[in-house]
Image (tube, helix red, strand yellow):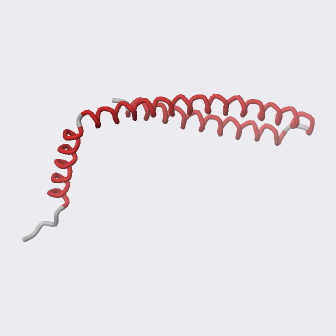
């Protein structure tokens, strides 16, 4: 239920971070061919852009953290309300895994 949303958010954050790195790389290449004065202006521009992108990234990370905590509380409450359901579920998974991974005797 919550996992796909979190995975999508994390993937979006990864894409944003990758884009930031790509943008900084292309701006750095541009700096190499510009004059010293122009390089100074470009460096300031890169710095400002990177700061803005980092602010956006931090905001999104905070939002993701808040959502994760919210979903963790929901799961925690559900487990506390139905502990035997989870115990039986994990017991069943353990038995299934034990059968699947047990060495075959001949």
Q: Nearer the viewer, residue 11 or 82?
A: 82
Instruction: Report which quarter residue 86 is drawn in.
Output: top left
Q: Is residue 36 left or right of residue 100?
A: right
Q: Is residue 26 left or right of residue 7?
A: right
Residue at 71% over, 38% down: 24
Residue at 48% over, 31% down: 9
Q: Is residue 30 left or right of residue 14?
A: right
Up/down of 61 relative to 100, above or below: above
Up/down of 17 relative to 63, above or below: below
Residue 66 horizontal/vertical position (percent): 50, 30
The N terminus is located in which quarter?
A: top left
Residue 35 horizontal/vertical position (percent): 90, 38
Instruction: Report which quarter residue 78 is drawn in.
Output: top left
Up/down of 100 relative to 90, above or below: below
Residue at 73% over, 30% down: 49
Outermost residue, bottom direction? 106
Q: Is residue 37 left or right of residue 97?
A: right
The C terminus is located in which quarter?
A: bottom left
Residue at 72% over, 34% down: 50
Q: Nearer the viewer, residue 74 or 94?
A: 74
Residue 34 horizontal/vertical position (percent): 86, 37
Residue 3 horizontal/vertical position (percent): 38, 34
Outermost residue, left direction? 106
Q: Nearer the viewer, residue 79 or 13?
A: 79
């Amino acid at each position: 239920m919550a996992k796909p949303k979190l995975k999508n958010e994390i993937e979006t954050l990864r894409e944003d971070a990758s884009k930031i790195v790509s943008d900084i790389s292309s701006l750095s290449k541009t700096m190499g061919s510009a004059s010293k004065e122009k390089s100074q202006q470009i460096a300031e521009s890169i710095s400002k852009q990177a700061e803005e992108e980092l602010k956006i990234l931090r905001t999104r990370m905070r939002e993701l953290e808040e959502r994760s905590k919210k979903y963790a509380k929901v799961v925690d409450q559900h487990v506390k309300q139905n502990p035997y359901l989870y115990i039986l579920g994990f017991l069943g998974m353990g038995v299934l895994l034990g059968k699947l991974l047990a060495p075959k005797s001949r």
